[in-house]
Image: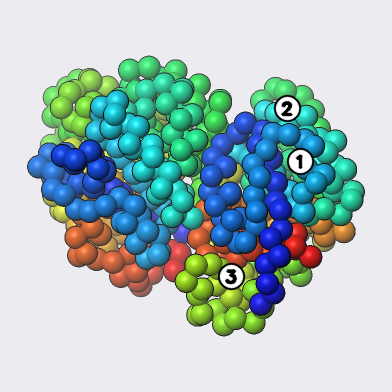
Amino acid sequence: MSMQVGAEVVVVDYGLGNLRSVTRGLERAGAAVEVTDDAGAIDRADGVVLPGVGAFSEGMENAGPFRDALTDAAADGTPLFGICLGMQMLLTASEEAAHAGEGDVEGLDLIPGDNRRFTGDLKVPHMGWNDLTVTREHPLVEGVDSVASETRLADGPAGGSVDGEYAYFVHSYYAVPDDDNATVATTEYGEPFPAIVANDAGNVFGTQFHPEKSGETGLRILKNFVDVCAE
Amino acid sequence: MLTKRIIPCIDVDVDEDGEPAVYTGVHFEDLQYTGDPVELAREYNAAGADEFVFLDITASAEGRETMLDVVGQVADECFIPLTVGGGIRTRDDIKETLRAGADKVSITTGALERPELITEGARAFGNQCIVISVDARRRYDEAGDHYEQVDGESCWFECTKKGGREGTGVDVVSWASEAEERGAGELFVNSIDSDGTKDGYDLPLTGAVCDAVSTPVIASSGAGSPEHMREAFEAGADAALAASIFHFGEYTIDETKAYLDDHGVPVRR
């Protein structure tokens, strides 16, 4: 297993939700974490986390002051990790804004595509633990080295792949990237939807689920992210 | 596949020395000391609990400060969703509790007294973190909106306040629909009648609420065995909550999930 070199990760605080768990999870994965509302901190970071709960248009409005810093960081190859609403904001647009009568609200457009609402007889929000099917390679879904899956580290994530593992979801909208290859893992709710997405370059990615609330599996994904940041 | 959730719940008060302690009761009374909240949270996290519910039963200002501190300590140990309830009456209370490390807040009396709190909370923090909790009581008179046949008698379910000590005249099923319309992301259904009995959940109550709403429902009060949880899931619940059977070591989370798995209920293992 690679040694941690203390990647410095910035968690963007744009005023929504509980940032404590994601901070603790990243720290446990070996990162030095700065929770900040200063856009300037983004270009100094080894990696950036865009968290988020709540509504798309409100999220984009609150994240407005960080838009340029985030797109610059993405263009420079800095790892940028969107979680839940933070992932949806990486895409171009969302039905949610129109649904709320707020017209077109521009996402960050780092992964071209749209976010759509679950339809049919499904209970919405999709809330709870659901399993992941990994559809292509990406550092975020790799196992930690070749540690056997039954070897749980006392104070950290287990080894093996995250394929087939459970993660905690709570959302009413899901991402539909224009390019099928942007999907890294899917989950089934009514039909399969993207649970993890990434851009072509591989440095912009997001999870629809909350890794900081997904037990050992989530901690492993956070560890993978911190490893990518440390490279 | 989306799995059914098993949720241990702790009721936390301060003891004589002002230290936080977990208590377990019967019919919302006769509380017995059961342990340290942070220690229990750590154990349940390791044991495979899907979520954790933390109810502050102190109801004093000093108690509340202590509780937010404990919520933070629990959040640092729990990489699973944490719902915190007790005494939440304002938008600021919601914000403070989320900041302390809760992922969701559970609101009972505060929402009954001022339903706008649901709307405001959902708008400011998202539907997903607003859990509306009801403490239901069966009534056999004609004052309700929705009736169920129970043992040959017709009854309705009344929302109570202050841990069941005060009635409200509000029908649980009507209230659940209103809470959903106002933006509640989840409904947490307790029963004064079955609390602590270990005779099983109030299934007519659970079923009636599940039929009325399309948001997730947590069944609570009365779990005495994994079989009771299976019954709640069959009645339509998305999650089953229990306190004493886990606290007193009668069943482990793993035994519970093994039973459910064997009976065709999807669970995370």
Which subunit holds the residue at mark 1? A
Question: Which amino acid type is shown beneath numbered disc 2?
Answer: Glu
* Pair 3/1: label in front: 1
Number of marks drawn:
3
Question: Where does residue A52 sit, x and y in percent of width and height?
Answer: 63, 40
Instruction: Respond whether the residues carrying marks 3 and 2 are from the same subunit.
Output: yes
Q: Which residue is drawn at 64% across and 49% down?
A: A33
What residue does disc 2 label?
A: A61
The numbered mark, 3 or 2, whose residue comes first in the sequence reads 2
User: Looking at the image, which is closer to me, B84 or A122?
Assistant: B84
Question: Which amino acid type is shown beneath numbered disc 1?
Answer: Ala
The numbered mark, 1 or 2, whose residue comes first in the sequence reads 1
Question: Where does residue A73 sit, x and y in percent of width and height?
Answer: 84, 46
Mark 3 to mark 2 CA distance (whole Å): 36 Å
- In the picture, the disc for residue A41 is 1
Is disc 1 in contact with disc 2, using a CB cutoff of under 8 Å? no
Is disc 3 in contact with disc 1, using a CB cutoff of under 8 Å? no
